[in-house]
Amino acid sequence: MRSAGGTESSLPHHPMLTALCAEPGTGCADVIACALRWAERLGARVLRRDLGASSQESAAQFLTRLARRLSRAEGTFVVGIDALPPSDEPHVVRQARALRKMHASGASVIVSIVPEGSQLFEELPECSVIGPSRLLVPLSAESRDAGEREMVRLTRGIPSLVRSLAGRLDATKGTLPGAPYVDALVDLLAGSVRPTLSDEDCRVRLAMIFLGSGACDEAARVAGSTRADVFEGIRTSAPLFGVAPDLSAFACVSASDVRALRACLRRLERACALHSDVLAAAMRALVARGDYERAAALGILTECPSVCEVVVERGAEFLDRGETDLARRVLDSPACPRGEEAALLRGAVAALAGRPWDEVVVPGLSQGRGAARLLTDACGFLGGQAPLYDSSCAPMGELERALHAHAQACALMRDGRFTDALRLLAAEAGTRRPETVSGALLVVDGEMARIMTGGAPRDDAVPEGARELLSRRALRGLRGYLVMEQLAEAALGRGTGDEARAQALVSRAERSGMALVQATSLVVGSALDLREASVTRAHVRASLASSIATGVGADYLARAAGLLMGVSRYLMGGRLTLADNGRDDDLGTVCALVRSALEADAAAVSEEAVPDEVPWNALWLVAMLLSGRDELSDLVARRLPTPWRRALGEDETATGRALGRGEDERGVGVVPASREAPLRLTLLGGFSLSVRGTLVPDWKIERRNAKSLLEYLVLRHGSETKRFRLVEQVWPDCDYVRGFSRAYQATSVLRRAIAEIDPDLDPFVASRTSREISLDMGMVSCDVDEFRRVARAAVDGRDDERVLELSLRAERLYEGDLYLPTSDATGFIAGLREELRNLCADAMVAGAEAATRLGRERTAARLAREAVGIDDLREDAVVALVRALRACGRSVEADRQDEAFRSRVARASRRRGARRLVEGADVGSDPAEAAPGACDAKEGAPGEGA
């Protein structure tokens, strides 16, 4: 080519005709812009035109005029044509003639066109064609760099996607990119389904976008196409869809982000309307996979009748995944089909939203089967409503079976058959999904049944996740189940910090509007009133509870309320009348115990002996009566048979308080050895300082690192400490002169706070000559010393009764980890904190083993669980826990603990083995050797010795 002045330049000597044949958004426009800038810098005259909005005819006319103009012009021209539209054969011939004429006149031409317009190149054999693979950004999926691998997964090297992630990519797999990436992806997805494509190609692409990833055969079934050449064309021209070389599978980039799919659907609304059968088939395929989140994203097009049909048809499954908004939008859409299924779905949505029951039940609908009826019944059960589901029908499908199990468990618990409910739920434990509404209901049911039979609530993340799901605003109709669980914990003295919070919970539940929740809250409130000696209010609440429970057919709850009503009447001075006395069930047995206790208090002779058999279905009521500090708790505790006491092993501290106000059940005193010291420092579970029983406010000793200094001196047993050691421990950023001054300021803060309560008390001994500070430990007692003494005695003990007694005392003393002060520069406190944790675990294991030998399996399980919570890799703790659980008849939970321990040991072995490899260890060594106890776990699992 010639430059504008006729001199030679670095431009090519011969004009070029180049075509970029690729999908929209793959960088063609950028390549053309770069080429034109380069040519302009070298002195060529540049022309550029975007024909993306032009028709075939207008594009051909423009090219013809431009070719005529260039044939008469002087100078060197470089022409860039963006987005030449694919055309029919007559227009292709004209466009090719015009491009050839430009090229023949000495102009270099670069043009971009989509793959379906490639017939243009048949008329231009001299044209150089650049395909999509040469336009991609070079990235390696096998790279060692995590960021580059993630870039490949999210972009496939498509320039617009790579550019959107520049400087904003989190290499952690699974994190969602930002809005620029989503916008770029939406543009690509919308451009990949163009009106210029054939219907078959468009349908296959839509199927891939909807499904996200999967087998090409599945996409073909959804699209209704079986031609392999369609997938081959997409593989070569559209890297966005990620079709495998053997055409077996695909992985569309849209699979990485559901947000992009939702945003893209509005841009594809016209194509979706034309191919609504593809949309419906994709939704059904996603539902069959269990990918309800992606199926719900497709449901945004509620004006499409086929979408509404799928949502109504599988409405219960969508509701089970929490997609209530989708169901509501579909039901409000004019395209929503009418009929019984839609009516049932509408009732279920209303029930889950907590609407009144007359707005939920549709007149004319009789009993029948279906998951939608069961979801509605789950909400109606709390209000005492008659079920819509026909229980004589065998449940069909996984969801219907799970909801039917929930309904059965609730019915059993309403009738007071908590052990039967626990067995039923244990059988369903392997199939439940906690991330679904049905699974969350079963988890909460299990927690409720466990609490009511005297067990401890689970402390893992599964119940917490279930509670979080059921507490969502869209599921207000199911929130009563969480309230019932909280009421059960409050009745037993768990879950709430004080009586005031428990009373507040009861008051809120009384106003809930759900009959069963109201009756339960009134029973719990009556028990709380008895603890607080508010006997009149207890009687009123019990009377209301009995009336409400009788009205909804909850006979068991009405009987429990009747028991509390009789007790409160007796405590008000009335005659002792307990209507349930003599009934041959667990609640009747507890009633006999209460009657025996009250008759003994009235110096009467009991007519009936209390049997030793544990009333598991009413054990909650026994624990509730024992949980207070009132006279009633004392009377019941004295008459409690020994097997009952063992069954309440997890409530022994409460039993001990009821029995002796500071004595355990055998009368052994639990008063700390150093209680007479005027200063009492508590460091386990938090920091508190009291002077002669009066608590020193925290804010008075927060300044000057006074708490750090006091804790350090006490844990060193008050021995004389050089001031420079104090400075290194508490004020490491100071020089010694300033540090000495701060040490005296801290002691002054403590002296002042103590003197406000007792002016004659000064525990510090400081010497300016020897530069030492010490404490008079005759004036100070600390719970750490008491805990150490008791825990070591438990570990070293030989008598099982004595070991268990000491272990329980150690458990009560160890209220939490050692308080970690704001300054611990030398790590002295942190090291001691870990030592005390291990000592606590040792004491808990010793106590668990002793309790198992004594036949107190529930206490053993609780102590062993405490040890596992401290160190979940302790094999002896897991062995003790598994053995105790099996002895309690909780074999399923024992197996779960066994398997969880194996998994933890394996993970620890892999981590330690990897660390050894990094440090230069022998590659061929056994990674299991890196974890102490791992080999033992293989040779003899914790469960096998139980």
Image: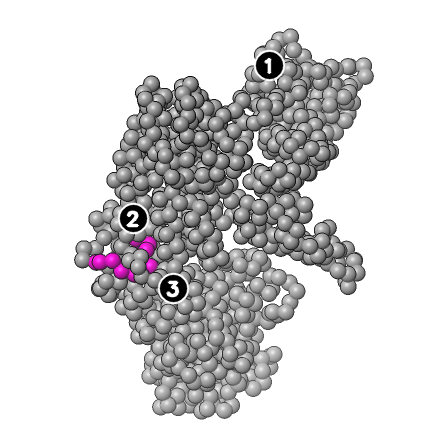
Q: Is residue 520 above or below residue 390?
A: above
Instruction: Judge the density around disc 3: few (<14), some (14-19), many (≥20) Cα neighbours within 10 Å.
Output: few
Question: Can you tell which mark lies on residue 127?
Answer: none
Write down the residue under mark 2: 380
The x and y percentages for residue 795 are 70, 35
Q: Closer to the camera, 679 or 281?
A: 679
- Horizontally, residue 709 falls left or right of residue 613, namely right
In the rendered structure, which disc, 3 or 2, sits on the residue that comes first in sequence? 2
Q: Quadrant location of residue 663?
A: top right
Name the quadrant of the N terminus.
bottom right
Q: Residue at x 29, y 67 (%)?
A: 309
Looking at the rendered structure, which numbered label has been put on residue 397? 3
Residue 742 percent across, percent down from the top left: 69, 21
* Vertical side of 510 occupied by 144: above or below: below
Q: What range is drawn magenta here?
A: 365-376
- Cα distance in 3D space between marks 2 and 1: 56 Å
Q: Is residue 35 left or right of residue 424?
A: right
Which circle marks residue 692 in the picture? 1
The mark lying in front, picked from 2 and 1, is 2
Look at 52% across and 65% down and name the residue there.
Answer: 154
